[in-house]
Image: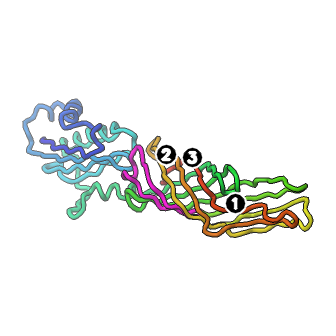
Amino acid sequence: MAIDLIRKPGAESCPDRDALAARLVPRLSETEASRGPSGDRVSITVERISAGYAATVSALGIGGGIRNLVDDGDDCAGLAEALVLTLSMISDGQVVTSVHVPELPPTIRASSHALRPWQLGARALVSTGMLAATTAGTTLDVVWHPWPRIATGLSGLWMPARSIDQGGGTVRFTVVAAMARACAAILPFGRRFLPALCAEGAAGGLRGSSEGYDGARSVWAPWLTAGGSVDLGVRVRSRFSVAAQTGYLFSLRDARFTVGGLGRVYDSGHPGWFAGLGALVQIP
């Protein structure tokens, strides 16, 4: 059996042709190992995908056909073992045609779902101006990768109440908003490191309440912002990543809060710099 093997960029850690052949020999039966060349030829293409590693095995001869192998491990060990098993089956004439897709490489069909994953996650967020001072909050995130270098996402933002004691009373503010983002990555999704540039936008409400003043009240004011950020994702496991970001937000509509006798006690101005750190889990 003649073996042709191509390792695409990113799959250099997978066994080459000679290493694969050396691992295959012990798997062959004594009869198979001693018999002459059968005329079978196997072509193998190995590549790195977002979910791990994939291989397309095309065999001509008794065990002819095409077989797609996908392993979601962090290294190529699992795929290498699957290749050895598949080749030993081919040598024994056990592999039958599984798919015939002449117009599309089978590896694309096998990995197309992995290249467009959904991710769920959460972040801790710190801002210098969302509540007129340095304040910590949190987001719940949903991310979708429609293309290998493009990501879109929606987040729910909550900034816990910040209190200001002034003039014998207390004023509290909190922000609840939905954030949308679109990111362009330098490298395809699925790599160990994923730097990206993102456009950010948010729409929600600023809630202000007061206690201890004449005519104390609570109000909601629209809170609209837009800006950008720089992100860095690091894949820790095949489906688990951590992500850090820093960016700046501009107000599209200022939110103000006034208290009778004190005048304006809050003006959103520019929400300013923010930074976040969180984790993402790929689904399914």
Quadrant, the N terminus = top left
Residue 243: x and y, percent? 51, 47
Q: Which mark is residue 144?
A: none
The spot of residue 41 in percent (x, y) is 13, 46
Label 2 Cα neighbours within 10 Å, binned few <14 / some 14-19 / many ≥20: many
Q: CA distance from mark 1 to mark 3?
A: 19 Å
Camera-side residue: 18 or 146?
Answer: 146
- Under circle 1, the secondary element is strand
Instruction: Left or right? Give the position of 70 relative to 254.
Output: left
Which amino acid type is marked by label 1? Val
Residue linked to disc 3: 277
For marks 3 and 2, give the one nearer the viewer.
Answer: 3
**Residues at discs 1 and 3 in contact (Cβ within 8 Å):** no
The secondary element bearing badge 3 is classed as strand
Tell me how far mark 1 sits from mark 2, CA to CA.
Answer: 27 Å
In front here: 249 or 13? 249
Q: Is residue 166 magenta?
A: no
Pick whichever of labels 1 and 2 is earlier in the sequence: 1
> Badge 1: few (under 14), some or many (20 or more) residues near its Cα, within 10 Å?
many
Which of disc 3 and disc 1 is earlier in sequence? 1
| Residue type at tag 3 | Leu
- In magenta, the rendered stretch is 179-203
Please name the residue that numbered disc 1 is placed on: 175
- Residue at the spot 14% in from the left edge and 49% down from the top edge: 62
Q: Find residue 2 and report its image quarter.
A: top left
Query: What residue sits 14% from the left and 32% below the top?
Result: 33
Q: Amino acid at mark 2?
A: Ser
Among the 4 quarters of the image, the one containing residue 208: bottom right
Q: Which residue is mark 2?
A: 241
- The colour scheme used here is rainbow
Dominant secondary-structure state across the stretch colored magenta:
strand
